[in-house]
Amino acid sequence: MNEVTLYPWRAFWTLYRREMLRFLKVIAQTVFTPLINSTLYLLIFGVSLGANIKLESGTSYLSFLIPGLVMMGVLNNAFQNSSSSIVSGRFSGDLEDLKVVPITPQMILWAMAVGGLSRGLVVGFITFVVGEVFHVTLQGVVTGVAHPMYLLFFLSVGGLAFAMIGISIAFWAKTFDQMSAVSSFVLMPLIYLGGVFFSIGGLHPIWQALAYFNPVLYLINGVRFGILGMSDVDVTTAAIVSIASLVFCYGLALRSLKVASYSRW
Amino acid sequence: MSSEAPILIENLVKDYGEGESRLRAVDHVSMVMRPGEILGLLGPNGAGKTSIISTIVTLEKPTAGRVSVFGFDVCKRPQQTKMLIGFVPQELIHHGYFDVMEILEFHSGYFGRLKNRDRIEWILRELALWDHRNKKVKQLSGGMKRRLLIAKALVHEPKLLILDEPTAGVDIELRESLWRFVGELKREGVAILLTTHYIEEAESLCDRIGILQKGKLLRLAATQELINELTKREIVVKLKGTVKDTVKDTVVPSHPYLVGQSNNELVFQVPSHIGAMDLVIGLGIELSLISDLTIRDGSLEEAMKRVLNDKTVIS
C-alpha cells in the first residue's frame, strides 16, 4: 500500500484540547477548590499568623508565602490533571481509545503534560492575583514580578514534571487508594517540606542538609526568585536540578506510556 | 491499494501469563482477508476471537507470528495501521465528561481530521444519533452507546472496519438497522471483520466465515460453501396414500438418502446441491400421489456445530 500520512501534531492538539475541556467542564473542583484553598492559606498563614513572623531578609511573611502558594497550586494541579485523566479513563474504558487511535506515546505524554501545566498555570495565576489582593490590602503595594522569565521557566518546568509524575503514578496504581496514597504520603510532604511556608535558613542544620535532597525545594525557590528576587538556593543550581528532575520524570512517564496496560480497571 | 490484503495473519500465537499459568489464547493462526469482504470470526467463548482482534488493532502484542494490515506490520508500523482501521470494541465506553458531538470531534482529531462536521453529521444521521448529539454518554441508552462506538470507528473513513460483538445486548430492530448499515459500508468498499454470537446474522451477512476453537482456526471458507459441505438438505415428501402402498415397485425402499419414514411421509437427507424436484423425479413416484413437499436447508449453525464437534472435517 502507498504510504499513509500521519498527523502527530493534530493528534497532540486534539488530546490537549480534550484535556483542557475536561478540567474546564468541572471547573468547580479543578479551579475554584484550589482557589478557596489558597485563599484560606493566605488568610490563616499570611494574614493572621504572618503578622507575628519576622524573616531575616526583612521581607513580610505574606510576600514570602505568595510564591510558595503559587508553585504549590501549579504542582498540585498539574499532577491532579494528568493523573485523574488517566485514572478516570481507566475506569470508564476511555483510556483504551488512546491505544487504538494513531497517537504516539510521545504525543500523549506531551498533550497530558502541557494540559496539566495549563491547569496548573490557571490555578497559579489565580492564586497570585488573590495573593496580590491581600498584599495590596494589607501593605498598600503589589509584590510585582522581579524576574518574569525565571518565573515562567520554573513554573513550566515544575508543572510539566509534576504532570509527568501524575502520568507515571496513574499508570502504576491499581486502585484509587494507591493513587491517593502516593499523593498524600510522597508528593504532599515533598511540597510542604520544599519551603512553601518556611525558609530553610531557619532550619536545624541536619534538616537543612536533608532539605537539599528535595527537588521541590529548588522549584519553589526558583519561583520565589522569579517573583521576589530572593531564594534560599542558588538560582543556577535550582535551574539545573529542576531540569534534571524534569528529564527524570519525562523518562518515567514515557516508559509508563509505552509499557503499561491501557485496559480498564 | 485494493490488491493489498486488508488483514494478513501469519502463524499468530498469543499467550497470556507465564510458566504454569500460561494460557495460549491464539494458537498458530494464519489467514488472509480479501479486499472488500465481510469476514466473520465465530467460535465459543474463549476461542480467541477477541485476542486476534486485539492484536490486529495493536491493543495486544503477538507472542509470535506476524500481523499486517494493508501491508503494514502492526508491530513495526502501528500508527499507519491504526489510521486504516475503525475499531468497535466489545465493551461500552462511558466518557464521563463529554457529549456525543465532542467525543466524535475528538476521535476525528486523533486521525488528523480537525474539521469533520459533515462526515460526523452523516454518520450520526445514519445511526439515528443526530437528535442525541448534545447528550452526555451517561444519558444514552445501551443501544445508543453501542451505536456511538460504531460512529467513532467510522469518523475517519477507515478502509477496514473491525466489529467485536457489535450487537451484544442490542434489540432486534437496531440489530437489523446496524447490519443494513454494515452492508452499505461494504458496498463502499470497506473490508469488514466481525465477531458475533448471533450465527444467523453471520450467515446472512458474511462472505466468509472463520471458525475458531481453543485458539485454533478450525476452518475458513465461504459461508455457503461451509453450509453446503457440512450440512444436508432435508426433504420431506408427504404422500396422499400410505407409504407402503405408494412406494412398492419404486426405488424408494433402497434409496441411499432415505433416513426415515412414517405412515404417509418419507424423510430424505440429501447433499445441498441436489434439488427437491430432482430427488422426487428420481424416486419414480407419480407426482399426483404426492400431497406436499417440505424442504429445510442446512444452516451455518449446524455447519459450525459439526466443525466444533467433529475434528475430522477440519482441513
Image (cartoon, coloured by chain):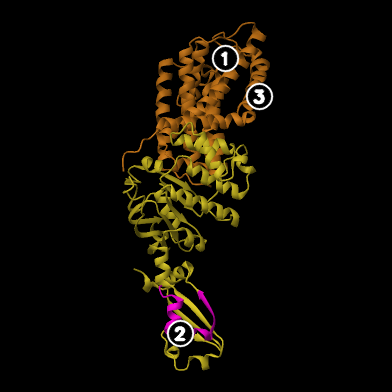
Chain colours: A orange, B yellow
Residue A33 seen anywhere in this rendered image of the structure: yes
**Could you tell me which secondary element the residue under label 1 belongs to?**
helix
Same chain letter for marks 3 and 2: no
Is residue A65 one of those drawn in magenta?
Answer: no
Above or below: residue B288 compared with residue A88? below
| Rendered residue at 52%/85% (across/down) | B288
Chain of the residue that carries numbered disc 1 in the rendered image: A
Q: Secondary structure at mark 3?
A: helix
**What residue does disc 1 label?**
A64
Q: Residues within 10 Å of mark 3 (few under 14, many from 20)?
A: few
Q: Quadrant of residue B27?
A: bottom left
Tell me where residue A5 appears, x and y as whole percent: 36, 35
Q: Is residue A261 left or right of residue A50?
A: left
Q: Secondary structure at mark 2?
A: strand
Identify the magenta region: B273-295
The single residue placed furthest to the front in the displayed view is B288
Residue type indicated by callout 2:
Leu
In the rendered view, tell whether residue A83 sits above or below residue B178.
above
Q: Looking at the image, is mark 3 or mark 2 nearer the viewer? A: 2
Type of amino acid under label 3: Ile
Residue beneath disc 3: A36
At 31% across and 49% down in the image, what residue appears? B3
Relative placement, left or right, of A256 versus A118 is left
- Residue at image location 56% in from the left, 40% down from the top: A88
Q: Position of residue A231 (x, y in %)?
A: 49, 14
Residue B224 x, y percent position in the rendering: 42, 65
Q: Is residue B281 magenta?
A: yes
Residue nearer the viewer, A30 or B19: A30
Local packing at callout 2 (Cα closer than 10 Å; few below 14, some 14-19, many 20+) is some
Give A86 or B175, whichever is nearer the viewer.
Answer: B175
Location of mark 2 (residue): B258
